[in-house]
Image (tube, rainbow, N blue to C red):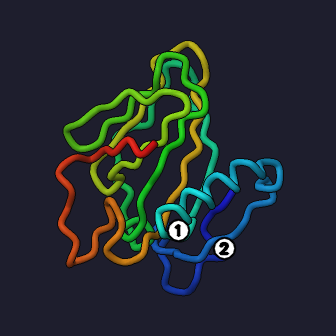
Amino acid sequence: MRAAKKPLPPGAKNANDVHEIRIMPEAEKFPCAQVFCESVAKSLGGELGRATLVALLPGCEVFAHVDSGAYYRIRDRLHLVLKSTDGSLLGAGNETVRMHPGELWVFDNKQRHWAKNPSEEVRVHLIFDVLPDQGRGFYTYLPEVARPEKPFILRF
């Protein structure tokens, strides 16, 4: 629904360093999701970044990785679980959680993380980023902000 602006600006190696956002044509098909993301960002005192709906097929996984780059370093990543029959597994750092429909999670995507759909049905999450006011983020890595001990926060 919301992605890195293209073409990439001069000097950008990939989208991980691009802060500017473009609204995708598909966004108009999901007005409620767009309003939800905007309202959460506002309630956190921040600005909405990228946003996407993601379906993970039954038995599939997202392999362990780290979201690196200037874009991710200063933003918090949130997952709203829309559909997940047996709960969605998400691991970050040394912690693993099982997320259920209706739950909104903030997690530290700057740590090594992975996801798995253990069910026999598709799993659907609304994933979005929030640029918080300086010093107000959960997992933003600014020099004056200490790194949280736990990589997950169940927000709502």
Q: Quadrant of residue 47?
A: bottom right
Residue 126: where, in percent of width, then height?
A: 59, 44
- Would you say 123 lies left or right of 147 here? right
Residue 26: where, in percent of width, then height?
A: 79, 53
Q: Residues within 10 Å of mark 1 (few under 14, many from 20)?
A: some
- Residue at the bottom extreme of this rendering: 10
In the image, is residue 35 above or below residue 5?
A: above
Sooner in the amino-acid sequence: mark 2 or mark 1: 2
**Depth order, front residue of 16/150:** 150
Residue 77: where, in percent of width, then height?
A: 44, 55
**Depth order, front residue of 62/107:** 107
- Would you say 155 lies left or right of 139 here? right
- The structure residue drawn at horizontal position 36% and vertical position 52%, both measured from the top left corner, is 109
- The structure residue drawn at horizontal position 33% and vertical position 45%, both measured from the top left corner, is 153
Instruction: Say which mark, if any, is on residue 15.
Output: 1
Q: Quadrant of the N terminus?
A: bottom right
Residue position for label 2: 6
Residue 67: where, in percent of width, then height?
A: 38, 57
Say whether marks 2 and 1 touch (CB < 8 Å).
yes
In the image, is residue 82 above or below residue 67?
A: above
Name the amino acid type tagged 1: Ala
- The structure residue drawn at horizontal position 22% and vertical position 46%, both measured from the top left corner, is 150
- Would you say 121 lies left or right of 14 here? right
